Amino acid sequence: MQMGKKRKWWFFYNKPHSYLSGEFPFNIGPHLVGSLWILKWTYGNFKRFIMLNAVIDAVFAFPVLRLLRKMRVATLVKFNEFQFFIYIFSKAFLLYGFQYFVEKKFSSKDNKNYNQERIQDAEQERTVISNH
């Protein structure tokens, strides 16, 4: 959001210009929380994740942004609505990709540890059985 403000992609009408009453609610608000919930509900099904993100981002980029402009909360300056949609929609690919690599990295370590524990348990069982 700060990059967009510096490059004058959008403008917040708050007076005085305060981060807390302007952009902050958008950074931690419904869009971020919604993206995380969409990821949680659809992770593992990339097609569903992208489709749902596209719908939600389109609703935000078109009707919600028009409402924000009418309410004099925020407006686009150097972006049109479609460019803004592409900007926020592209973040969905980054979010999914980041989560995919994190899951792959940590799940492979967990699986390796789990498999080693299973091998050790099996060896202990064989030792117990052979001693009886």
Image (tube, helix red, strand yellow):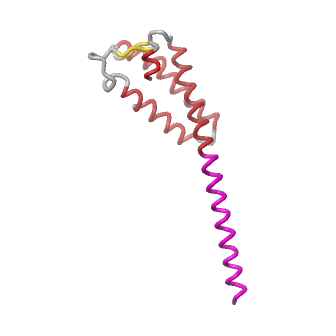
Looking at the image, residue 103 sits to the left or right of residue 69; the answer is right
Q: In this view of the protein, which residue sits in the foreground, 128 or 34?
A: 128
Q: Please check the rendered image and state whether residue 127 is part of the magenta-colored stretch, yes or no.
A: yes
For residue 61, side relative to residue 48 (left or right): left
Q: How many marks?
A: 0
Q: Looking at the picture, tell me which residue is in the foreground, 12 or 89.
A: 12
Residue drawn at the location 46% of the way across and 20% of the way down: 3
Residue 53 is situated, as x and y percent measured from the top left of the image, at 55, 29
Residue 79 vertical placement versus 113 (above, below)? above
Q: Is residue 131 above or below residue 102?
A: below
Q: Is residue 62 left or right of residue 18?
A: right
* Quadrant (top left/top right/bottom left/bottom right) for the N terminus: top left
Position of 76 with respect to 114 (left or right) is left
The span shown in magenta is 103-131
Most extreme residue toward the bottom is: 132
Residue 80, horizontal then vertical, whole percent? 50, 11
The image quarter containing residue 10 is top left
Characterize the magenta stretch by its predominant secondary structure.
helix
Residue positioned 43% across, 22% down in the render = 2
Q: Quadrant of the C terminus?
A: bottom right
Q: Residue at x 65, y 57 (%)?
A: 111
Question: What x and y, as percent, mark residue 108?
Answer: 65, 52
Quarter holding residue 73? top left
The residue shown at (30%, 21%) is 18
Q: Quick one: which residue is furthest to the left in this view?
A: 16
